[in-house]
Image: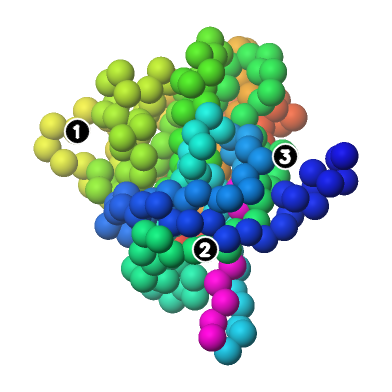
Amino acid sequence: MAGTAVRRRLSWQRAEVLELRHETPRASRLTLRPPDWTGHRAGQHVDVRLTAPDGYTAQRSYSLASPPEREAVDLVVERLDDGEVSPYLTEELRPGDLLELRGPIGGYFVWPAAPDGPVQLIAGGSGVVPFLAMLGHHRASRSSVPVRLLYSARTVDDIIGRAELGEPGSDATDAEVTVTLTRGAPDGWTGPTGRVDSALLAERTFAPDRRPQVLVCGPTTFVETVARGLIDLGHDPGRVKTERFGASGGP
């Protein structure tokens, strides 16, 4: 039975595009209905494959933004100007189109099945996407585990998941959310500004003595900087999980 399940998860299927909407000026949210979806864990990702008329194919991996409790699945795709796949997904795709995807994939960088302490999420740029699924799952499952998110974005307009995160201090999520802006803040902004450094980690994340499970996601340089900062603060390296992707200009 396990082998059958693995084969199903890794099989390509054509998912119908139900909705597309701009998440930020550079990112779009795709809502899909895979016909043979077996469910997923918050934090998993899928592969998306495009095939040209001449048979050329290109595929990319995208984190799932929707919690497991939803029937449809959401992806958030950030457009890369020199990309092969993201311009099509963000500008050409339309509701009713069919999109090849495979998954869900991954069992390491996921919401802990049985958290034995608070959960600290730290995101840079589009690294927040898997955490949207985790926060949605935390809320939908009525989990009592304390959760904090520290999220680094360039500007207010670049914040992904504003509907889920709300403004800092709002009731949109039951997690404690801190957003820091690295490239300028609007008038009236009350959150921090600047890149995530040791001082901000110490101020806005769970202290090491609370033994949080920490998940960090973002561009490689961001993840490496944050991971070093966490270790310097005294966090147990064995309780810090990271997921990184290629640089896209940095959060």
Of circles 1 and 3, the one toward us is: 3
**Neighbourhood count class around disc 3 (C-alpha, 10 Å): few under 14, some 14–19, many 20 upward:** some
Q: How many discs appear?
A: 3
**Neighbourhood count class around disc 2 (C-alpha, 10 Å): few under 14, some 14–19, many 20 upward:** many
Horizontal and vertical percent position of residue 30: 42, 53
Residue drawn at the location 32% of the way across and 44% of the way down? 159
Q: Nearer the viewer, residue 17 or 233?
A: 17
Q: Quadrant of residue 212?
A: top right
Q: Given the current orientation, which residue lies at the most extreme left position?
A: 187
Q: Which mark is residue 122?
A: none
**Colour mode?**
rainbow
Lateral position of residue 55 relative to residue 8, left or right: left
Q: Secondary structure at mark 2?
A: strand
**Above or below 90: residue 131:** above
Horizontal and vertical percent position of residue 141: 53, 18
Contact between marks 1 and 2 (CB within 8 A): the answer is no
**Above or below 213: residue 54:** below
Q: Secondary structure at mark 1?
A: loop
Q: Determine if residue 75 is in view.
A: no
Q: Which residue is mark 1?
A: 189
Lateral position of residue 178 relative to residue 228, left or right: left
Of circles 2 and 3, the one toward us is: 2
Q: Which residue is mark 2?
A: 99
Q: Which mark is residue 107?
A: 3
Mark positioned earlier in the residue sequence (1 or 2): 2
- Type of secondary structure dominating the magenta stretch: strand
Q: Nearer the viewer, residue 37 or 136?
A: 37
